[in-house]
Image: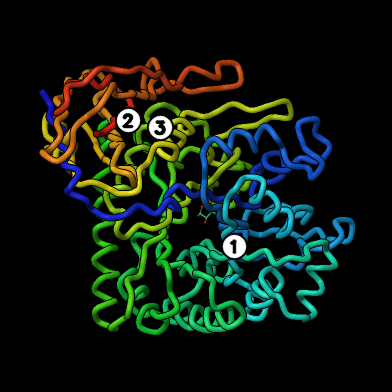
Amino acid sequence: MDQIRVDVDRTLASIDRNIFGGFAEHLGRCIYGGIYEPGSPLADSDGIRTDVLDALCRLRMPILRYPGGNFVSGYRWQDGVGPVEQRPARAELAWHSVESNRFGTNEFVQFCRKLGTEPYLVVNCGDGDMREARDWVEYCNGTQDTALVKMRRQHGFDAPHKVKYWGIGNEVDGHWQIGAKTPEEYARAFLEFAKVMKWVDPTIKLTAAATSDWSGDILARVGLLVEQAGKLIDYLGIHWYVGNPTNNFQEYMAVSELIEDRLSAYEGLARMLRLQHKLPRPIAISVDEWNVWYRKRSEAGDFSNTLEEIYNLEDALVVAIQMNAFIRHAASVRMANLAQVVNVIAPIFTNPNGLFLQTIFYPFELYSNTCGTTALDVYWEGDTFSTNSHSGIRTLDVAATLREDQKQLTLYVVNRSETKALETAISLGDSAHLSGPVQAHVVNGPNIKAENSFEHPNTVGVSRGSLSAERKGFTYTFEPHSVTVLVCSLD
Ligand code: AHR
């Protein structure tokens, strides 16, 4: 029998709810035809798709990154404010489309307010300059009687937007980026952009675009960045996408090891650089783009696909595995943004008449709604599996959190076996007792390749149940290929 042992005194760190953030880019049908579709019978008077808004509300994302992504490296924010009919359409070179600019800063902030989420704006550090970046902060957050603040007021927004989170550039380490930067160029640009942006509003938090090319010159690049601008960096931004291109389920499930390696290594790097440069506070990690993405990738020169990935059950397991890692690394991962939110590599998929929820929607919804405030250090052992590069990987992937009032323990368990149900003894340490039944929420479907669609929207979904437990523990059998969230009340 497998074992999971939790001791509520063995805490790891507080959890920043911003790990349940999202990301929306001007790309394909994420904004236009996803979030925003004026004229649609499903849209409200601001053109926001209410069905999308309702579905996104269920995910309780505390923060939403915008407007890109690769898109931002050629974006002029001033094109997207003011009277809509006067906004210029521009050739868009990141995804080879035409950007109408009908949706821009103010529409985005209004959308965030409807959603109850904090806007996180990324400035153009590709072909854009520090003047534009600082002006955008002033336009959004300024309160003095300046031309930019007057302009915002004329645009109908008297009160400042108070945008707290800002990123400087996107994936500047990638050759695919408009205005990609060498380590020296980016360290210098970050320093100068950050300086003036924080001079305009000292309360803002800044993310540096640190790593997206995992085979690039990471140490030199991040080392130089922190050496030159460490005091101005609130988050080191890292991106990754994972997938199953060889159609090997076990290899895919072993992606946990890669995620652990990346997070542990990055934590070490951030700590080392803090020591070396005697920084007064730790630098947090923001995984400000993460997801499964491997099917709908643009081949060289072909921009016809718009990243409309259809997810299956094994992808939902991998999304949960990544969130388990964020919980286990809560001390350093203080923000994470699921890329993206609608249609484009997303948990929600629309057509003009409605939407369906993709498989990955369900683990995200469950985690975001049940996560406690403290990550716990869980011990678990039992069944294992091996791949070409790893042996002895525990078949269950586990994380746990405790609610602030210490009255609720939540266990997050991914059973990575395609065929085996795993009977597991779950026990508590000395200082806590279970009180009342345990609520079980299980994401599963008929097989690992099961998908949802407009025709079959509920092939993969959540089943719920409740089980009785002794005061010190209980036995639970995790279904094959499932994500299970066990919510336990404590005395
Ligand atoms: O999310 C899709 C793209 O992936 C983003 O535009 C870019 O930042 C990353 O490469």
User: Left of 243 or right of it: where is 4?
Assistant: left
* Residue 298 visible to an observer of this rendering: yes
Q: CA–CA distance between discs 2 and 1?
A: 35 Å
Q: Mark 2 and ligand 1: say if the CB distance to the nearest ligand atom is below 8 Å.
A: no
In this rendering, the count of numbered labels is 3
Q: Give the Cα separation between the discs numbered 1 and 3.
A: 28 Å
Check the image and report above or below for 475 versus 404. Answer: above
Point out the frontmost of discs 2 and 1.
2
Mark 1 or 3, nearer chain start? 1
Residue 472, picture quadrant: top left
Residue placed most toward the observer, 418 or 12: 12
CB within 8 Å, label 1 to label 3: no
The answer to which of 302 and 405 lies nearer the viewer is 405
Say what amino acid the circle numbered 2 marks: Val
Q: Quadrant of the C terminus?
A: top left
Compared to residue 396, the image places residue 455 above or below, namely above
The x and y percentages for residue 224 are 36, 80
Asked whether the beta carbons under mark 3 and mark 2 sit within 8 Å of each other, the answer is no
Are there few (<14), some (14-19), or many (20+) residues within 10 Å of tag 2?
many
Which class describes the residues within 10 Å of circle 1: few (<14), some (14-19), or many (20+)? many
Near mark 3 (Cα within 10 A), the count class, few <14, some 14-19 or many ≥20, is many
Query: SS of the residue at dot 1?
Result: strand
Determine whether 220 is above or below 397 in the image: below
The dot on residue 121 is 1
Q: Which residue is mark 3?
A: 316
Q: Position of residue 391 (x, y in %)?
A: 12, 39
Q: Is residue 190 left or right of residue 363?
A: right
> Which of pointers 3 and 2 indicates the residue nearer the eye?
2
Residue ID at (55%, 16%): 456
